[in-house]
Every structure is written in C-alpha cells, then in structure tokens.
Amino acid sequence: MKPENLENQDTRPRAEPGGGAPELLTASQFARVCHVDLKTIHNWADRGEVRHFRTPGRHLRFRRADVVEFLRKYGYPVPENLRAGKPKIVAIDDDPHVLASIRRALGRRFEVTTFQDPFDALVAVGTIEPDAIVIDVQMKGVDGMRCLERLKAIEATSRVRMVV
C-alpha cells in the first residue's frame, strides 16, 4: 500500500451542519490538522499540552478555541475554517463610558460582551467561554485582584487571558 500524499489529503475538520466551524474536534481530526499520528495527540493530551475533555465513553474531544491556541503556540498554520468567528472578550467595568470605549475599540475584531456588575460577569463567564477578560481591578465593592486569582485557579477559566 502506498503512503498517501499529504498535499492531496484534506486535513480540515468537517464543518458543523449549520455551515460554521466545528466547535468540537475529535482526536483524529486534530491529528489530521497537525499531520501527526493519533497517538501523538493522545500523548499531548496526557501531558497537558492541549486542553481537552473526555466523553462518557472516554473519547478525547477538543474545543475549537483550544485547538487554535495550541496551533498558534507551537507555530502550526491555523486552517481557515478553524479561524471562523471572532474571538470572544468579556469587559468588566463599573463605568459605562469605559465599556462603550472598549466596545468601539474592539468591536470590529472581537465579539465583545460588557458588564457593569462584576458578579453578573463572573456568573456569565462560564457560559460565554471568552478568549480574554478585560477587567477594572478597582471597582467599588469588589477586590479585582482576588477575582483574577480565583479565575486563574478555576480549571474552566485558567487559560483565559486577563487584561487589567
């Protein structure tokens, strides 16, 4: 059996039924994107090189954002269909004028969600799954530095970039 020519092989993960980028990739899809063996993906996951989770049947799954982060970190080209969609940013500030400025400055390149109430923001962060959080650490009634420490300590938000 002849080895397949990688240049002719389709390495793109299949799109979602709605036509967008896949939000979850299998280990096999991830391996095709990186041009590596399936075992390499399992090794990377076991060593914590790439964020992942397991299905109830113990199959590896990777969120699109985590795969893109991994690819950029290690210098792999990011396939166009994985780049689809804007990165998500959550901005937290008690000043509505600051939030409006952030929305204007970042709105073209990012999907920006703003919150004046830090408690509402912290509850929503788990659902929104942002790529970055912009936070005012000197808000009234909230210890901003403590919020940052807690967000970094929680597995679900530990890899989210924080901008103060």
Image: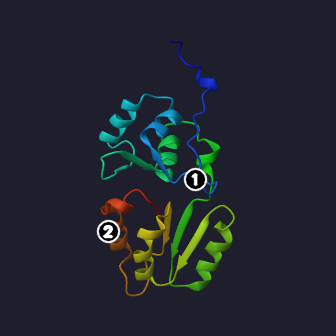
Mark 2 or 1: the one toward you = 1
Percent position (x, y) of residue 17?
59, 54
Which amino acid is tagged 1?
A: Glu
**Residue at (34, 45) in percent of width and height:** 59
Which one is earlier in the sequence, the residue at label 2 or at label 1?
Answer: 1
Which amino acid is tagged 2?
A: Arg
**Label 1 packing within 10 angstroms: few (<14), some (14-19), many (20+):** few
Of all residues shown, which one is farthest toward the top? 1
Of residue 13 and residue 45, the one placed in the foreground of this image is: 13
Percent position (x, y) of residue 74?
48, 37
- Name the residue carrying label 1: 16
- Name the residue carrying label 2: 150
Percent position (x, y) of residue 7?
63, 24
Of residue 45 and residue 139, the one placed in the foreground of this image is: 45
**Residue at (59, 79) in percent of width and height:** 98
Q: How far apart are marks 2 and 1 (CA)?
A: 34 Å
Q: In this view, does 121 lie to the left or right of 53?
A: right
Q: In which quarter of the image is residue 11?
A: top right
Of residue 55 and residue 128, the one placed in the foreground of this image is: 55
Kind of element beneath mark 2: helix
Percent position (x, y) of residue 77?
58, 37
